[in-house]
């Protein structure tokens, strides 16, 4: 890629994305894109993936999937939404639905109808903790100042799911999380039930690999997953993290060591990082004494 500036690469990727948006729901193969933008398909794919974290094919798949969800939210029948979004058959969508939706397309159309979600909202060292679980694991974990906004957010996401308050049944999960917040255990290794893209899952797994007491920047995470130009996509994946703490997006800071943003509030982020630094120092001191 000698002789090709980063600005030129960014402009190229923007043009490719715009073209794919314009022709959607039709699609373009990698050779077709290479011919249109006068470069080898391999080189185009490499530049595109460095900038976005995904391939042009995955980008088009995401466009179709987001379009499908928009059709469903508008009240269309599942069959109509499948073909309206550009799928040639329903089989490919159903292959993706379990990973990306965590439910069948029909259930998504009904905003989770047919699902059962158990939840509990309790006081915690950082205010109020909401934990919502399915039979697979935690599907939502959020922090706030009062239960009402957290419950409203849960209802909006799973409006037609059966949502059951079960403080006793969810108590096991809550106890583990509280123990973490109080410094009794360093990490949260709990089963999750997530709706995400492959790229988001890759980022989230990398976040879970950050040791307690350490932090990373977006660019460091991007480099760690083998996509060093995908810092912005990493930031977006962090912002969409539905399970605070278990996926520790609070361990991501700016390259200049500033805290950056945090969906649940900067004071909570600061408190979490300080608590984890203290835990690491105490563990090291105990090790040195032994």
Image (spheres, rainbow, N blue to C red):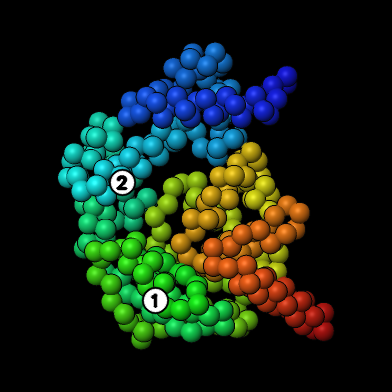
The label on residue 69 is: 2
Residue 197, image x and y in percent?
Answer: 44, 47
Of the residues tagged 2 and 1, which is closer to the observer?
A: 1
Towards the viewer: 58 or 156: 156
Mark 2 and mark 1 lie on one chain; the one further toward the N terminus is 2
Q: Visible in this render: residue 105?
A: no
Residue 168, image x and y in percent?
Answer: 36, 86
Q: Residue at x 57, y 83 (%)?
A: 125
Q: How many marks?
A: 2
Residue 56, image x and y in percent?
Answer: 47, 30
The label on residue 213 is: none
Quadrant of res 147: bottom left
Q: Residue at x 26, y 58 (%)?
A: 111
Residue 40, image x and y in percent?
Answer: 55, 17
Quadrant of res 164: bottom left
Q: Quadrant of the N terminus?
A: top right
Tell whether 117 sits left or right of 257.
left
Separation of residues labelled 2 and 1 (CA atoms): 27 Å
Q: Which residue of the protein is positioned furthest toward the right in this rendering?
A: 288
Towards the viewer: 97 or 63: 63
Secondary element at tag 1: helix
Secondary element at tag 2: helix
The residue wearing badge 1 is 148
């Amino acid at each position: 890629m000698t002789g090709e500036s980063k600005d030129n690469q960014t402009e190229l990727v923007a043009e490719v994305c715009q073209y794919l948006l314009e022709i959607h729901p039709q699609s373009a193969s990698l050779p077709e894109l290479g011919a249109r933008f006068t470069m080898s398909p391999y080189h185009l794919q490499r530049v595109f993936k460095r900038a976005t974290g995904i391939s042009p094919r995955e980008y088009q798949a995401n466009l179709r999937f987001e379009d499908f969800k928009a059709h469903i939210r508008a009240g269309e029948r599942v069959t109509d939404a499948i073909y309206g979004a550009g799928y040639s058959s329903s089989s490919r969508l159903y292959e993706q639905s379990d990973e990306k939706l965590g439910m069948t397309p029909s259930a998504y159309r009904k905003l989770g109808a047919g699902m059962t979600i158990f939840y509990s909202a309790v006081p915690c060292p950082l205010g109020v903790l909401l934990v919502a679980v399915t039979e697979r694991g935690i599907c939502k974990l959020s922090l706030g100042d009062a239960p009402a906004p957290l419950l409203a957010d849960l209802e909006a996401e799973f409006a037609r799911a059966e949502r059951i308050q079960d403080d006793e049944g969810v108590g096991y999960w809550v106890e583990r999380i509280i123990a973490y917040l109080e410094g009794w255990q360093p990490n949260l290794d709990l089963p999750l039930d997530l709706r995400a893209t492959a790229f988001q899952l890759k980022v989230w797994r990398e976040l879970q690999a950050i040791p307690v007491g350490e932090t990373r920047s977006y660019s460091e995470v991007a480099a760690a997953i083998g996509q060093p130009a995908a810092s912005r996509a990493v930031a977006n994946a962090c912002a969409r993290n539905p399970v605070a703490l278990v996926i520790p997006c609070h361990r991501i800071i700016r390259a200049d060591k500033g805290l950056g943003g945090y969906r649940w509030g900067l004071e909570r982020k600061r408190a979490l990082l300080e608590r984890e630094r203290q835990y690491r120092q105490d563990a090291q001191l105990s090790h040195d004494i032994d």
